[in-house]
């Protein structure tokens, strides 16, 4: 009976596996964990914040998060796993201020009753990603950089190390994915970086060089630690198309993507481009000239549908990792509509000579209904003649 590793390798090698491999990313503390793992400091945000307020040991947090990640991946029968990483070793300890409220680093936090996540009480306290960097400070760092690459840790992420240990003990041959960006996620650039691309290209290129070199070193070490797939690139597009012009993408972003792909391949792993959005205006560079092996975060709602990916010939060159709609279908549709959507995706994927791995178009994020993800996996299991999960989606909804 083929295992997960053989299944994933077949998909990336443009061979049809015994069944479409399954992959997923789960939002930490999503209530979907509770019926599977119980409510612990690794699955329940409020419990975790209470425990941190009481001074829980970092090692206990790591173990709880590792157990949650392992149990949820095993329960849903994943073939490829991407973990969320360990909590900060020297985490900032919150102070409990109410039944479901805390203060940390001078800011107030509350439990969101809809998502069951701990969030800022005043959303305005959260700076946009593009405002988190000071131009003068970054300019100074770039101009002062002497080309030195800092030492890269050889210690695996402790959650990854523990999950791998748990999986191997049960004979699970999961393929592990790491996400490592090299400064090419233009969608998250602060405004001054976009201006540098146009007005000070040499400064921008020096900044990009400073970002990519330590990342390339980290990438090689991650592969040595056992990650067989590296998700790289980062968001470059929105629903309307790329955040920068196709010419700028070709001039600045593509060469770094190509270089990162070579690092990944030389280390012996597969390179997967990961980016939300509509990439059709940069189709040739994004899919073909980049040299990547796969494409993740296939944004169904932005027009990156399986039908068009096949029509445009993308499926004949890359392994498509998607394409369950996580923006509308998994959030708002009825479970039976989710099942129909998934079965259609699987039928199209089985016709794809480039390979297909089933995955939500982003992740099981906070707005995804737990019962809808269960419906998606049940549709997958039924499609391949497997036993459905051991409870109904309505039962899951009632227990959350």
Image (cartoon, grey):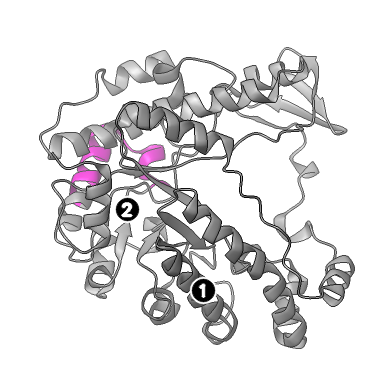
Disc 1 crowd rating (10 Å Cα; few below 14, some 14-19, many 20+) is many
Classify mark 1: helix, strand or loop. helix
- Mark 2 or 1: in front is 1
Question: Residue 40 at what x, y percent from top left?
Answer: 55, 16
Q: Residue at left 27%, top 72%?
A: 317
Q: Quadrant of residue 121?
A: top right
- The question of residue 342 being in magenta is answered with yes
Q: Is residue 287 left or right of residue 77?
A: right
Q: Indicate the quadrant where residue 209 lies.
A: bottom right
- Packing grade of label 2 (10 A; few <14, some 14-19, many >=20) is many
Residue designated by label 1: 257
Question: For the point 81% across and 75% down, which residue is it?
Answer: 146
Q: Residue at x 38, y 14 (%)?
A: 398
Q: Specify the label residue 169 is tagged with.
A: none
Q: Which mark is residue 323?
A: 2
Predominant secondary structure, magenta span: helix
Residue 241 or residue 289, whichever sits in front: 289
User: Which span is picked out in magenta?
Assistant: 326-344
Q: Which residue lies at the image location 41% right of the left edge and 32% below the top edge?
A: 369
């Amino acid at each position: 009976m083929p295992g997960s590793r053989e299944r994933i390798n077949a998909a990336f090698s443009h061979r049809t596996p015994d069944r479409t491999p399954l992959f997923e990313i789960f939002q930490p503390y999503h209530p979907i964990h509770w019926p599977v793992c119980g409510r612990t400091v690794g699955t329940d945000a409020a419990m975790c914040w209470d425990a941190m307020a009481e001074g829980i040991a970092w090692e206990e947090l790591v173990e709880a998060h590792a157990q949650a990640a392992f149990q949820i991946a095993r329960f849903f029968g994943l073939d490829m796993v991407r973990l969320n990483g360990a909590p900060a070793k020297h985490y900032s300890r919150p102070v409990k201020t109410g039944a479901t409220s805390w203060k940390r680093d001078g800011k107030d936090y509350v439990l969101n009753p809809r998502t069951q996540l701990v969030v800022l009480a005043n959303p305005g306290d959260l700076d946009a990603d593009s405002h988190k960097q000071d131009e003068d400070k970054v300019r100074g760092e770039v101009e002062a950089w002497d080309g030195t690459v800092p030492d890269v840790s050889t210690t695996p992420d402790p959650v990854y190390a523990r999950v791998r240990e748990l999986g191997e003990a049960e004979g699970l041959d999961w393929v592990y994915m790491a996400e490592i960006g090299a400064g090419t996620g233009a969608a998250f650039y602060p405004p001054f970086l976009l201006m540098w691309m146009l007005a000070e290209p040499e400064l921008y290129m020096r900044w990009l060089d400073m970002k990519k070199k330590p990342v390339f070193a980290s990438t090689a070490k991650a592969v040595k630690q056992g990650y067989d797939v590296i998700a790289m690139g980062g968001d470059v597009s929105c629903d309307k198309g790329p955040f920068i012009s196709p010419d700028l993408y070709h001039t600045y972003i593509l060469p770094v993507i190509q270089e990162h792909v070579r690092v990944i391949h030389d280390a012996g792993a597969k390179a997967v481009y990961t980016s939300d959005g509509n990439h059709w205006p940069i189709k040739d560079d994004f899919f073909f000239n980049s040299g990547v092996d796969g494409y993740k975060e296939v944004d169904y709602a932005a027009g990156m549908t399986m039908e068009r990916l096949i029509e445009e010939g993308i499926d004949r060159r890359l392994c498509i990792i998607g394409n369950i709609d996580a923006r509308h279908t998994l959030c708002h549709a009825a479970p039976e509509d989710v099942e129909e959507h998934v079965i259609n995706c699987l039928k199209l994927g089985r016709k794809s000579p480039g390979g297909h791995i089933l995955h939500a178009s982003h992740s099981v994020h906070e707005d995804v209904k737990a019962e809808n993800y269960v419906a998606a996996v049940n549709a997958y299991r039924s499609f391949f003649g497997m036993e459905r999960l051991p409870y109904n989606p309505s039962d899951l909804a009632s227990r959350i």
